[in-house]
Amino acid sequence: MMRKQLWCSAAVGFLAAALLAGCGQKTDAEVPSENKTEKTNPVSVTQVKEPEAVSAEDFERRSQVRENNPVSGEFVSAAQAFSYDSAARLLAEGTENRNYSPLSLYYALALAAQGAEGKTEEEMLAVLGMMDKAELAAQCGNLYRLLYTDHEYSRLKLANSLWTQQGVAFKDGFLKTAQDDFYASVFPVDFAGPEAGIAMGQWISQNTGGILSPQMETSPRDVLVIINTVYFNGQWINRFEESSNTEGSFTTAENEEVKCEYMHLKNASQTYYEGDGYSGTELWMKDNGSLMLILPDEGVEIGELIRQEGKLEEMFSRRDGQGGLMDLSLPKFRFGDSLELADMLRDMGVKEAFEEQADFSAMSDEPAFISRIKQETHIGVNEDGVEAVAYTEIAMAGAGLPEGRHVLDFNRPFLFGIISDQGIPLFLGVCNNPQ
């Protein structure tokens, strides 16, 4: 039976995945097409209300949000393991800049898993680190509400959407979970024409602050595209002063000297980490996690560190740093990245989902399989703070006492990670060249 395609996009990064599905019998709910004439402006057929944004000063309300949305230790550990395992496979090789949002991929894959059954479901849940897809969905919903931030100091916003082929039916349970736990809007479109791709690109742009505006390709065989976006903007607690910036040299991964603009913190009270082959620090942001920076020792390559089993998680999960004074020099950097993720997921154990015998019968009665998964991201670091975005598309064809002064000069390739207050990586990457 000919199979059509399902696409999922997530993050800023965005992730896109395509699912191919056949022409089987229509099931529970045929997603209505309420806007066939206005093709470039599809209207969502679901009313998704985003979580209430709580102000930075409303400590009582913030406490209530945490109490009402418990995230289990099992789920946090699963998300961390997935993040570091997948990132190690992506960041260890190459000399180019890399930026990856494991959170975006995790949400897109978790949403796709809600439609899986049998061995397909088992493999997807194993990679996601959870035993039950209903519990996975509930935990994703709780984390979504915990992470949601939108005030003057910080913004962290996730968004999900389902783009469905007009006239194709999807099961009520799958659509309800997508709406209730993933806050997914549903847009019926016609994938045979260019308008669907244009509309999806516009939706990604709207949900990533205009930073990402991808040209989304579609096919008449597509039946579903899932898009997840992640937008993060955080301000430093200890801001870099632009007047202190200097021009300096950076030695790239290809051993070339390039000029870049360095930001400096002098005599700053910072946490310092030191391990076998590396040192690092953590730059805290107002009300929303931190940027961790890892500098390999002289003569140690980033790939050499990452290829050591468990090393990436060790470096970014440490909370045993020493407090003290630090002179820090960090280049300003800004770049985008694009990643094809299907082969990586196959290597991690998601195999049947990409094959003809894949079972996505909890999504639709039409046979379907994932054909590709793509993520695009962008990150910028300057004197004020950090701005990072991602989309993912799945297509289905405590410090100690000060102990002296530390000096960290990030004048050679280094690792970075934006880590949430829950300890879950939002973005992980490598800066091989800040230019």
Image: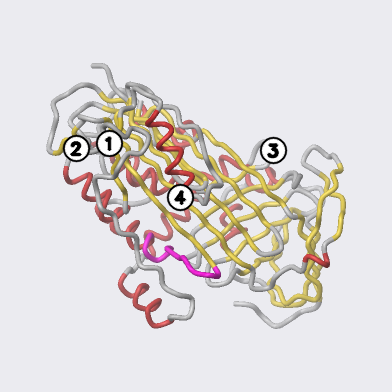
Give me the C-alpha separation between circle 3 and circle 2: 45 Å
Q: Which residues are magenta?
A: 144-153
Horizontal and vertical percent position of residue 307: 63, 44
In the depicted structure, whether residue 164 falls above or below residue 10: above
The residue mark sitting in front, 4 or 3, is 4
Label 4: few (<14), some (14–19) or many (≥20) C-alpha neighbours in 10 Å:
many
At a point 19% along the width and 37% down the height, the residue shown is 32
The residue carrying mark 2 is 32
Q: Position of residue 401 (x, y in %)?
A: 70, 83
The answer to which quarter of the image holds residue 272 is bottom right
Cα distance, mark 4 to mark 1?
19 Å
Query: Mark 3 to mark 1: distance in Å?
Result: 38 Å
Circles 4 and 1, Cβ within 8 Å, touching? The answer is: no
Residue 45 is left or right of residue 281, and the answer is left
Which residue is the site of mark 3? 96
Q: Is 239 placed left or right of 30 in the picture?
A: right
Between discs 2 and 1, the one toward the N terminus: 2
Question: Which residue is label 1 attached to?
Answer: 188
Disc 3 marks a residue whose amino acid type is Glu
Can residue 368 be seen?
Answer: yes
Where is the N terminus found, in terms of image quarters?
top left
Q: Residue at point 60% right, 52% down? A: 312
Secondary structure at badge 3 equals: loop
